[in-house]
Image (tube, rainbow, N blue to C red):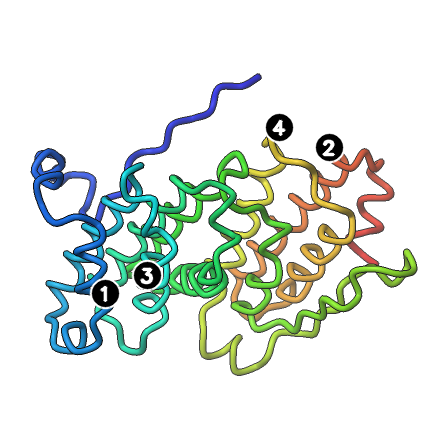
Amino acid sequence: SARKPKLPPLSTEDDSDDESDDDDSEDDGPSASEILKQLQSPEMYSNMKWKDKAELISQLGNKASKEDGMHVRPQALNIIQDALGGKNANVHVLRSALIAAGLIGVSMGTDLIKQSSWKTIMIETIKLLKNKQCFSLAKKVLEQLHIHGRCFTVANSLEFIAHVLGVGFNSSTSGGKRNSQVTELSQPRKSSAVGGNNIEVVGWLAESIGRERKMESVNPMQERSLLVAFDLFLSFANHREQNCRKNATDGLVQCVLYSVEKLDKDMAQAMNMCSS
């Protein structure tokens, strides 16, 4: 089997900045439970400066990701959920929350998606692909959580992805007759297509399917899920932005290759899935 590539560690700073010397001193600080109490106090949190919030969330991520902090992980993820989903959040707080989500998520593995906070964390992280200040970090965190199916797969995230893209998602069609298994999608809402830049999200989804296509450790997604992905890309195939159309085309190509390589379709069948 192929060796798993090791991704670079997550960091709030540019690669040129090295703050790894602080790692040893962090173990001498407050425990994960003590940090959690500070962040869970409405009075303390509301009066806290953004710099202090970012620092505490960063510390919480480091502590909760270690074995002796595993007991606070669900509560820590609730804090991260609130930080990512808050209105007018400071960019440094967002970045700390992203890194903390990545650290804790990697330590939890597939248990991450069982948490009640996961839906919001995933949706808000995907949304941050549209944020120029957070794009690179959000993409890195998603890759860390996705690689080798460590925490999530494309199939179990399609509903969240469709939500961010502003495309209607009807999960009630998941059973029954074979010809009704395709999950119905509506065209992107105009307000979403204009108000939010979906270029990076469509591009990330295309890359994720391409990455998952090469993952031997992940069970292939069902044909029904792949058809949903096809429809998501088709929804943006005629987008007014050239880069969005390009990313949608790349996504369709990845879906065709996925159906051939992972679902044993011949090329004619794969192309039919794309056009149906």
Determine which residue is flagged by label 4.
216
Disc 4/disc 1 C-alpha distance (Å): 36 Å
Percent x, y of residue 171: 72, 66
Quadrant location of residue 39? bottom left
At label 3, the amino acid type is Ile
Q: Residues within 10 Å of mark 2 (few under 14, many from 20)?
A: some
Percent x, y of residue 191: 52, 82
Disc 3/disc 4 C-alpha distance (Å): 31 Å
Q: Residues within 10 Å of mark 3 (few under 14, many from 20)?
A: many
Determine which residue is flagged by label 2.
261
- Horizontal side of 217 relative to 147 (left or right) equals right
- Horizontal side of 101 relative to 228 (left or right) equals left
Q: Which mark is residue 80?
A: 3
- Horizontal side of 92 relative to 144 (left or right) equals left
- Horizontal side of 228 relative to 147 (left or right) equals right
Quadrant location of residue 187? bottom right
Quadrant location of residue 81? bottom left
Indicate which label's residue lies in the foreground, 2 or 3.
Answer: 3
Determine which residue is flagged by label 1.
91
Indicate which label's residue lies in the foreground, 4 or 2.
Answer: 4
Disc 3/disc 1 C-alpha distance (Å): 14 Å
